[in-house]
Image (cartoon, rainbow, N blue to C red):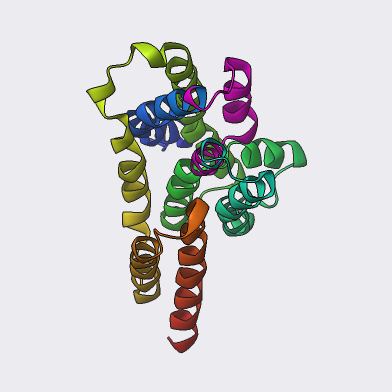
Amino acid sequence: MAEKPFRRGVAEGLPFVIIIVPFGALFGVLATEAGLPLAQVMGFSVVVIAGAAQFTAVQLMSDGAPLAIVVLSALAVNLRMAMYSAAMAPHLGAAPAWQRALIAYVLVDQTYALAAQTYETRPNWSLADRVIYFAGVALPVFPGWVAATWAGAALGARIPAGLGLDFAMPLAFLALVGPMLKSRAHVAAAFVSTAGALLLVWVPWNLGLILAAMLAMATGAEMERRA
């Protein structure tokens, strides 16, 4: 029986709902606690669709950081989307402009990670297969994120304080990053980013994360150059 890319995409995207729901709910709770009204919280999730950048912006707003720091930090965290787009271009760059626009809209960590791995193992797929697979992956991920954000924002006060929704963030990134560590450069970059983030935790406004990311990228690039 012929493989169905859309069905495969939905099946592989569904497990991420387990992570997306607490992740989105946590953002909704934190954003309302930071003083954002429900409309702005939902605007964040529907328009920006960038979990880590959203958390960064809300945390900095709660800390009273200057607006320039909030914007620059969120943009820096989201720079990875430029790398995601560059990596997707060889696979999806020939698609019509409207399809590429929709793909860019729902290009997040989860959809990128699954698509990047699947495209490598399915070099025989046509462009239409790759596009429909991406749509299948995004189908459960995007609505799950938006619905969970609404639930967190609207019902946050009723969520027991001891529920511990913050487990979702590290779990999400471990699930995404772990399978992608395929070379010594990847492992070295991951190690430097983790160690750097811990050692630079004292830097105000979480800017230590940005510095750690820059150190990790430099380490990975140098390892690739020497390979």
In this rendering, the answer to whether 112 lies above or below 45 is below
All told, the count of numbered labels is 0
Question: Is 215 inside the magenta-drawn segment?
Answer: no
Q: Quadrant of residue 19?
A: top left
- Find residue 52 and report its horizontal and vertical position in percent: 49, 43
Q: Residue furthest bottom?
A: 226
Image quadrant in which the N terminus is located = top left
In this rendering, the answer to whether 48 lies above or below 225 is above
Q: Front-most of 104 and 27? A: 27
Image quadrant in which the C terminus is located = bottom left
- Find residue 16 and report its horizontal and vertical position in percent: 36, 34
- Find residue 164 and report its horizontal and vertical position in percent: 26, 29
Q: Residue furthest front?
A: 64
Question: Is 50 inside the magenta-drawn segment?
Answer: yes
In this rendering, the answer to whether 124 lies above or below 184 is above
Q: Front-most of 20 and 154? A: 154
Q: Is residue 124 visible?
A: no
Magenta region: which residues? 33-59
Q: Residue at x 63, y 50 (%)?
A: 69
Q: Is residue 85 left or right of residue 117?
A: right
Secondary structure predominantly adopted by residues drawn in magenta: helix
Q: Residue at x 51, y 57 (%)?
A: 207
- Find residue 172 and report its horizontal and vertical position in percent: 35, 42
